[in-house]
């Protein structure tokens, strides 16, 4: 999987963290996919903030 392949990275995260199968993700319309991608982005940012906060302690 290429580092710059955003769709594959989202599908990987959706599968492993959200338990959404890749074919389910691809069958969603673009608005549903956009919502999932936005939720993934938010979750990743929250995880980064949490890790950064933990390093400060």
Image (cartoon, rainbow, N blue to C red):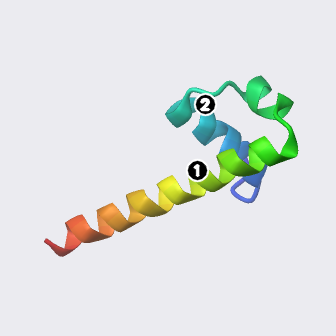
Residue 40, label in figure: 1
Is the residue 51 above or below the residue 34 in the image?
A: below
Whether residue 50 can be seen here: yes
Give the residue displayed 53% in from the left and 58% down from the top.
Answer: 42
- The reply to whether dot 1 and dot 2 touch (C-beta < 8 Å) is no
* Side (left or right) of 51 relative to 18: left
* Side (left or right) of 24 relative to 54: right
Answer with the quarter of the image where residue 47 lies: bottom left
Task: List x then y, in percent, for residue 3.
Answer: 69, 56
* Side (left or right) of 37 relative to 33: left
Is the residue 25 above or below the residue 57 in the image?
A: above
Q: Secondary structure at mark 2?
A: helix
Residue at mark 2? 15
Whether residue 9 can be seen here: no
Residue 26, label in figure: none
* Mark closer to the observer (1, 2): 1
């Amino acid at each position: 999987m290429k580092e710059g392949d955003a769709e594959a990275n989202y599908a990987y995260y959706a599968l492993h963290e959200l338990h959404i199968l890749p074919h389910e993700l691809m069958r969603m319309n673009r608005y549903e996919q956009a919502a999932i991608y936005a939720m993934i982005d938010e979750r990743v940012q929250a995880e980064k903030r949490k890790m950064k906060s933990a390093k400060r302690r």
